[in-house]
Image (spheres, rainbow, N blue to C red):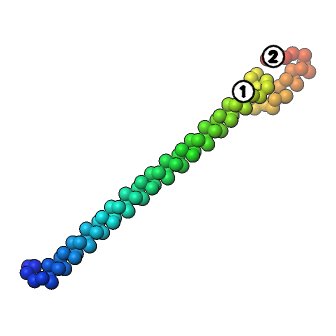
Amino acid sequence: MKFNSIRHRFVLAISLFISVVLVVIATGTYAYFRNTTKKLISDQQFAMVSAIADNLDTSITSAHTAPGSAGRRPGRRSGQADAGLLRQGTVCH
């Protein structure tokens, strides 16, 4: 196919121009959404880690401030273990 006429050259130039514009738009859109998605994931992960750290900090703080919580067995309420031992006359701390 020869492009001798001005009409053929014009159609080819317009087609190439539209193709280049579409490639540039597609690349820009991809880069924008990729960066936006990375930022969104990063923000969500930071929020999740912050919530876990706050929960852990609260747990540690409440464990340090709770009176007499050091000698308790896990799974029992605070007074159950001592009440049974006091009735028997022995206390182990």
Q: Which amino acid does label 1 sit on?
A: His
Looking at the image, is 11 positioned above or below residue 39?
Answer: below
Which residue is drawn at the image coordinates 83% and 25% (left, top)? 81
What residue sits 23% from the left and 72% below the top?
17
Task: Between residue 2 and residue 35, name the one nearer to us.
Answer: 35
Residue 88: percent from the left, percent from the top? 90, 18
Placement of the C terminus among the 4 image quadrants: top right
Name the mark on residue 84: none
The N terminus - image quarter: bottom left
For marks 1 and 2, the one nearer the N-term is: 1
Give the residue at mark 2: 92
Spot occupied by residue 72 in the image (x, y as percentages of width and height)? 77, 25
Alpha carbons under labels 1 and 2: distance apart: 20 Å
Type of amino acid under label 2: Cys
Q: Residue at x 90, y 16 (%)?
A: 89
Q: Can residue 59 be seen in this view?
A: yes
Q: Can residue 72 be seen in this view?
A: no
Q: Name the residue under label 1.
A: 64
Q: Nearer the viewer, mark 1 or mark 2?
A: 1
Q: In which quarter of the image is residue 16?
A: bottom left
